[in-house]
Structure formats: C-alpha cells, structure tokens
Image (cartoon, coloured by chain):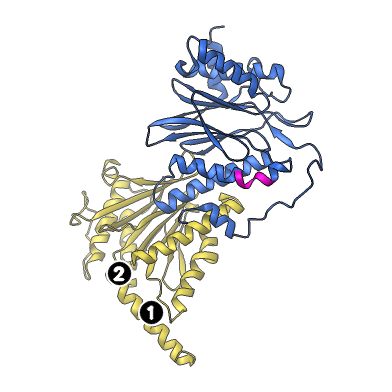
Chain colours: A blue, B yellow
Amino acid sequence: MNGDFLSLLAKSSFAAGASPVAAGAGPPPLEATTVFAFHCAAGVLVAGDHRATAGNIVFSDRTEKIIELDRHSLLAIAGSPAVAVEMARTLQTAFEFYRRSQFQPMSLPAKMRALSRLLHENVPATLQGFGLVSPIFAGHDAATGRPSIYFYDPLGAQFEAAAYAGSGSGSGSIKSVLHFLEQWGRPKPEEMPLAQAVCLANRLLLTAAEFDTATGGVDPAGGDFATVKLLDADGVHAISPEEQAQFWREAKP
Amino acid sequence: MTDEPYRWLEAVANRREYIRDQLKGATPVFAFSRPEGILLCGVGAGQSKIFEIYDRHGLAALGHPVDIEKIRQALIEAAHLEGFTRAPEDVTVRRLLNFSLGPALKGAFEQVFSAPLIVEGVFAEVGSAPGTDVLARFSYDGTHRLETGGIGVAHAAPEREAAAAAWLAKHAGGGAPLAQTVNAALAAWQALASADGAFPEEVPAAPPDLGGRLVELALLERAGPGRARYRALDASAWAHHG
C-alpha cells in the first residue's frame, strides 16, 4: 500500500513480536494515568498529570503523556507507557512518511484508523495483562475545519466525544466534574477562554488526586503544572508552565 | 553475449552513452548552502524536481520522472525506517548514499538486460552551521562526490556543470542575499538550458524570463520549530528577500 509505513515496518527486520508470557507473571505493570480532553472556546484542550505507577509504587512524577503526533494531532496516553510511547512514535513516523511520500497530509479518518490498527495489533499484550493502552486522540479535521476528540477502548474501537473524554485511573472524578459543568456550569467548559480552561484542567487533576493515588505530579501552588496542549485550526500549541502560572495567578478564586 | 568480458564492457559503455543521450533534454538543478539553510532550486514544465526526503534532507534531481520517483521513494523509505529503528539524528546523507541510493543506482546501471535509472541530482542535508551542511552530487551509475564549496549543481553536461558551479561561486556564494542567489541560479539555468548559452557578466537584478516555466524553490531551514525543516518557498516570496 503506497505511503503505508506500518506495512513497510512489518516487512523490515525491526518487526519482532513480544514472546508470549503467562498472565500474571512478573512484577505489576507500569501504568500512566490520568489524561483528559475537552472542548473550550479556543479549541480542544488536552491535559494530563505527570505520574506513572507500578502497583502501589510511584514510578515517576515526570512522565509526559500528551504527545504531539504531528502539527494537527495529539495523543494522550493512559496505560502501559512502554507500549503507548512506541505507538506514538510509530504514528509520528507513519504520518510524516505518508505526507512526504504522497505529497499530502494523511486525512483525519486515516489517522484514527491507524491508531485503531495499532491498538488491535496490541490485543495479545492487552489480554496478557501488561500492555493495556487506552488513549485519547485529538485531531483537527481540514475537511470540517474543527478539532475533534476521540477515545478508544483497548481493542481499538473508536468513539467521538461530544464535549470531553478522559482515560486512566483518575478519569472517573474528572469526567464527573466535566459532566456537571457541561450541564450546569456558567460558563460551560466549551465556552471558557483559554486561561480559564487551563486553570480548570489543573483543578480537575487536583480533584482527581484527592481520590486516586495514581494521579499526581501537579502542584500549582508549588510551581508544578499539568501538561496542557491546545489544538486549534493553526495546529498544536503547548501551554508552558510559565503561561499556566500566569493564568493561575490571574484566576479568580 | 555479455558473458565475454569485452562484450560486457561494450554493453556498459553503450548503456552510459544511452543514458547521457536520454539526459540531454533535462535541465539543471541547484543547491546552495546559506546562512539560513540550504536552498534548493529547479525549473520544470509541470514535473517536480525538488523534494522533501526526511527531517533535514532534500533532493534536487533531473532525469526521467518515473526514475526520479523511484529513487525518491527508496530514499524516503530508507530514511524513515532508519530514523524509526535508530533515531532521526542517525539519518545522514553519507549513510543513505552508502547503503541505499548508491547501491540502487549502481545495481540498475550494471544490470544490462533491464532498464537503467535515468537520474542525476544533488542530495542535501542541513546541519547546525553552514560548515556542517552536506551536498552530495550523485550520478546515474551510483558514484557521488561531496561538494565542499557550498554549491551543488547537477546538469547532464559535466563541463557546463563545472562552469556553472564556478560562475555561481563567484556571484551567489557565501552570504549573498537570497534574492540574488535565486536570480543567479535562474540565470545559470537559462545559460545551461541552451547548448551554448553564455553566463551573464553580472547577476540580473530581476528574475529572467523563463517562458512561463514553473520555478521550484525550497529551503531546508537551519533552525525552526519542529523536526521537519523543509519549507517549500512561494516562487513570488523570495523576491521580497533583501
């Protein structure tokens, strides 16, 4: 298939599958939590904390989970970082390979299918209990002119989120708050300007961390902010900790 | 026939003559190492000659469009596999020439019972400073040379190519303004496109009239956001550079 990096990769010597192991063997799998995305007035905001856990162990509080796949798409990863980061790297290369070889960017539906395909190919690792990935994908559709949010089940089924999506162990609290705000908030998250939406993202993670030990690594009062990226018609914009600090200071209590 | 050594040599010589004859109608392409990056320039009549290959790599080629496309695809595949399995920093012109482009061209050239690849060009890699840029002038038989003067020209006639490179080094080398470099490249193109066209005394102040042909310009930017440094330039935009 022309422009298909995944097929090219399968033919190369790099494609070596994982050896089968019995479920439950080995130490607790490493997991990255918590990520979410919601529509705001500026576009789609994608955010996540910095924590990776292995069982009851905090493995890292410096994990980057919001990955720019190309100028117009983002992947927020929850689940096994080893598998998820490799998926992101594969997609980054596949999108660029297609753009360069075919003289046009890959369409949004094709990008989503590429992620579905990787998740489907990962089913054996998921069933063995060490490779579960449950990502959120945000992409800007040149055809419709608007950014969209999609979430996936670990088998590769995709669903479009009308207003928000969340994944990872702390996402239950976050989705509850976002649902409440979408129903009764004034303004609703989709009406919030960027500064307000960024503050909301940090507050959502602080809320999730109250009930989920696997959510953490965010402490706005101490200068540690979430990873926050905005997707709009111009592409992906990372909101730096300095910008977030300014928004946080200027936010009304 | 070709199992006899002298017959094989004769077949290869005939092949070289055939390729050179096929390349006669092709027009030149240019590459310039500049402070802001590497400028690639080509002029075509509906067929592209300037291509993005990888993050810091571009190709300027002349020859049969189908053969250009074959080596373009081969280079893109090799570069992306290499960048994925190792790292983007490990993708270099020297390595791609040695394990991908060179063997592919030499193999096609010496397989005397199949069609050769009718293609020549310049393969470019932008570095962190002009001194680390790489411009490789490659030929249809798999040979290449690395240009050390910061200017790469690919043309079907070697003597005329050398004359153009010398003229461009004098008039468009180093830190010449971008518009001057482009006008010099187009003047050199005009001179080379005719069999005995003379190079002008000075670089024309305005782009020469190329009879409505499509001017292709791209810059491999030395610095910029993201990993991909290839930027196609609007043919009208470069005229505004001072």
Residue B73: which quarter of the image? bottom left
Q: Position of residue B26 (x, y in %)?
A: 29, 67
The residue pinned by badge 1 equals B16
Q: Amino acid at mark 2?
A: Arg
Q: Residues within 10 Å of mark 2 (few under 14, many from 20)?
A: some
Quarter of the image that includes the C terminus of chain B? top left
Q: Position of residue A186 (x, y in %)?
A: 48, 9
The residue pinned by badge 2 equals B160
Residue B223 is at least partly visible in this image:
no
Residue A32: which quarter of the image? top right
Question: Which element is circle 2 on?
Answer: helix
Q: Which mark is residue A160?
A: none
Residue B208: which quarter of the image? bottom left
Q: Amino acid at mark 1?
A: Arg
Q: Position of residue A15 (x, y in %)?
A: 63, 55
- Given residues B50 and A33, the one toward you in this image is A33
Tell me the residue at 45%/74% (across/down): B108
In this image, A248 relative to B9: left or right?
Answer: right
In the image, the segment drawn in magenta is A120-124
Q: Position of residue A93 (x, y in %)?
A: 53, 48
In this image, A153 relative to A39: left or right?
Answer: right
Dominant secondary structure (helix, strand or loop) of the stretch shown in magenta? helix
Q: Residues within 10 Å of mark 1 (few under 14, many from 20)?
A: some
| Mark 1 or 2: the one toward you | 1
Residue A1 is at least partly visible in this image:
yes
> Which subunit holds the residue at mark 2?
B
Reply yes or no: does residue A122 show up in magenta: yes
Mark 1 vs mark 2: which is more N-terminal?
Answer: 1
